[in-house]
Amino acid sequence: MASTPPNPGSPRASFVAQPPFLGRERELAFLNELADSGRPELFVLYGRRRVGKTELLQQFCSGRKSVYFLAAQVRDRDNLRTFRQTIAGELGDTLAGDVDFPDWSSALGFLAERAAGERLVVVLDEFPYLCEAQKSVPSQLQRFWDTRGKHSSLMLVLCGSQVSFMENEVLAERSPLFGRRTAQRRLEPLRPLETLPFFPHWPLEERVLAYSVLGGMPAYLRRFDNTRPLRENLLRDVLRPEGFLFDEVQFLLRSELSNPATYNSLLAAIARGSSKLNDIATDVGVDSTTANKYLHTLRELRLVEREVPLTDPDPLRSRRGSYRIADRFLQFHYRHLQPHLSLIHAGRGQRVLEQFVEPDLPRLLDEAKVDFVLDHLRHEAAELVGDELPDVAR
């Protein structure tokens, strides 16, 4: 991996080769199936930030009669005003530019009328922002759907990056929208094998190492320049304070969790090697009950996994469970960034790379290979036996 790091100020250092739309063919096919169903559809799409929701929806809307709206963290009236302008621009509807929508039920009712029996896709991206600005938005959408939406030709898509909000306030039984959705999908990171095409110019081992650092998040994978070695990408985007991925984990935690400090400590403890509940609690300095509560939240977000022996007769109640970080980039962050933040802030990212990261590459490579093998086995088994998928052990 030895090479001269790029000058961050040079044009070459800021260039990132962008691969074509990759790895979401199944999800795109599912969206097209819904759009062609001939029925009104209310689809809920959610998943972590950077997992590729917006790109997927924009790719889907391309070539279709559609209104794609990205909500902002502003007051409700401002979002409605921007939505009105978006309708006018996307549909070429000059009348929309003059309509003052009092609420979202009225705005969507306007679109249902304009669709006039022709399929119209309406995407409300970052839907939680709309609800933050106006708590009654889910109730407004319920009223619209019950009175007009379910009789219309609309395909309404609600999309959000705050996983806990989308599950608890949109999909859960207590939500006004409960029972209205016609389909939903939690968009997951790409499978290990799906990450390889992002780096066509790299040897296979380096592509596997890229997965060991970045995991399956499309935005992270796209950020790395596949015409430059992995080492240069690490120095540019991860191991310096200005890097695109330097603060990514903290942005993620703050968007989902009210007390990031405790979660940070729990994840760091697991990255250091603690895997049993009592050991993690002791490392962090909290009691086991508290640690278990926080770990449960991390499991719901799929940032942490609890593994039990394959032969355990009662996995849910097993006392032999162990915890591991489920996301490769989080694992890399807590192993190699967080312990060395002072050095990185002092401009010594290259020292961190040479002294701490590169000696650990063999372990990273071995761990990533296990992920590739298990992923292959799971999908081969699924094709063979369908719903009767056997357990696959690590």
Image (spheres, helix red, strand yellow):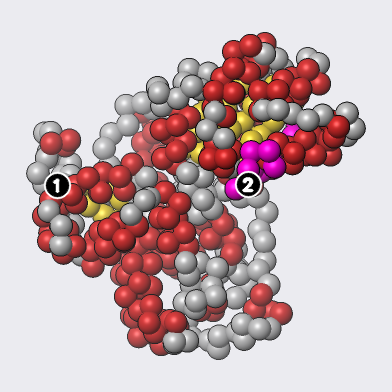
Q: Is residue 65 above or below residue 260?
A: above
- Residue 204: x and y in percent read 49, 65
Residue tagged 2: 74
Residue at 62% x, 21% y: name it: 41
**Image quarter of residue 389:** top left
The answer to which of 162 and 332 lies nearer the viewer is: 162
SS assignment at label 2: loop
In magenta stretch: residue 65 = yes
Q: Is residue 170 above or below residue 8?
A: above
**Image quarter of residue 333:** bottom left
Residue at 26% x, 44% y: name it: 296
Report the mark closest to the observer, 1 or 2: 2
Q: Is residue 342 above or below residue 125?
A: below
The answer to which of 277 and 195 lies nearer the viewer is: 277
In this image, 33 relative to 265: left or right? right
Taking the image as drawn, is residue 35 in sight? no
Residue at 68% x, 38% y: name it: 77
Residue at 12% x, 61% y: name it: 282
Residue tagged 1: 289
Residues shaded magenta: 63-78
In this image, 74 relative to 354: left or right? right
- Residue 278: x and y in percent read 11, 55
> How far is mark 1 from mark 2, CA to CA?
39 Å
In this image, 218 relative to 329: left or right? right
